[in-house]
């Protein structure tokens, strides 16, 4: 996480030399692979929604919600739980039709089913590549660290307004 934070700081230090092409609000959907570094957990493909705003300098803000079913085995018995994340990120996107993205923020995660409920909050960050699809849409490919042992590889489509 420290390396990711340093990379995001270095990327944001260049913000003064770029002017973002698109400013304003957007809404998006995303999915991908939630990689959990544990032999007992296996996550289905998550589904997420993103609301955000990007300013002219390339700096912006996003609220992101993701949900996935997580299967796990304890003492030979299989269970399924609901895994949800809600995050608030500060973001930066470089200029151009193909661009780099960095994000850093606070994330809350919840894992629950009929007999267990766990939650945690902490720092989350990610990097990605984006492609503007005209004035109204963009496609983003991202790597996000949810926590030390949970990584999220995602693809999303944003609609700009």
Image (tube, rainbow, N blue to C red):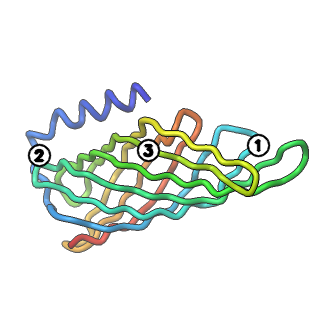
Q: What residue would you read off at disc 2?
A: 18
What residue lies at 36% left-to-right and 67% top-to-bottom? 28
What residue lies at 66% left-to-right and 48% top-to-bottom? 117
Residue 45's spot in the image, x, y percent?
60, 61
Q: Label 2: state its secondary structure.
A: loop
- Label 1 crowd bin: few (<14), some (14–19), many (20+), radius 10 Å: few
Pick the quarter of the image with the N terminus. Answer: top left
Q: What residue would you read off at disc 3?
A: 107
| Residue in the foreground of this view, choosing between 137 and 64 | 64
Compared across the picture, whether 11 is left or right of 21 comes to right
Residue 83's spot in the image, x, y percent?
60, 54
Of labels 2 and 1, the one closer to you: 1
Q: What residue would you read off at disc 1?
A: 40
Of labels 3 and 1, the one closer to you: 3
Of labels 2 and 3, the one closer to you: 3
How far apart in space, not on screen, are marks 3 and 1 (Cα)? 23 Å
Q: Is residue 142 above or below residue 8?
A: below
Residue 26's spot in the image, x, y percent?
26, 66
- Label 2 crowd bin: few (<14), some (14–19), many (20+), radius 10 Å: some
Q: Label 3: state its secondary structure.
A: strand
Q: Is residue 72 above or below residue 23?
A: above
- Label 3 crowd bin: few (<14), some (14–19), many (20+), radius 10 Å: many
Q: Label 1: state its secondary structure.
A: loop
Residue 50 sits in which quadrant? bottom left
Residue 87's spot in the image, x, y percent?
40, 49
Q: Is residue 147 above or below residue 113?
A: above
How far apart in space, not on screen, are marks 2 and 1 (Cα)? 45 Å
How far apart in space, not on screen, are marks 2 and 3 (Cα)? 28 Å
């Amino acid at each position: 996480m420290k390396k990711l934070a340093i990379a995001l700081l270095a990327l944001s230090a260049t913000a003064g030399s770029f002017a973002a092409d698109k400013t304003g609000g957007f809404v998006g959907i995303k999915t991908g692979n939630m990689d959990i570094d544990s032999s007992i957990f296996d996550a289905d493909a998550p589904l997420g929604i993103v609301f955000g705003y990007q300013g002219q300098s390339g700096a912006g803000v996003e609220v992101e919600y993701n949900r996935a079913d997580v299967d796990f085995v304890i003492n030979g018995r299989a269970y399924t739980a609901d895994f949800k994340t809600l995050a608030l990120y500060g973001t930066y996107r470089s200029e151009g039709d193909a661009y780099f993205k960095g994000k850093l923020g606070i994330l809350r995660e919840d894992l629950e089913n009929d007999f267990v409920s766990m939650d945690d909050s902490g720092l989350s960050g990610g990097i990605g590549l984006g492609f503007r699809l005209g004035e109204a849409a963009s496609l983003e490919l991202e790597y996000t660290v949810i926590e030390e042992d949970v990584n999220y590889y995602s693809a999303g489509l944003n609609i700009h307004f």
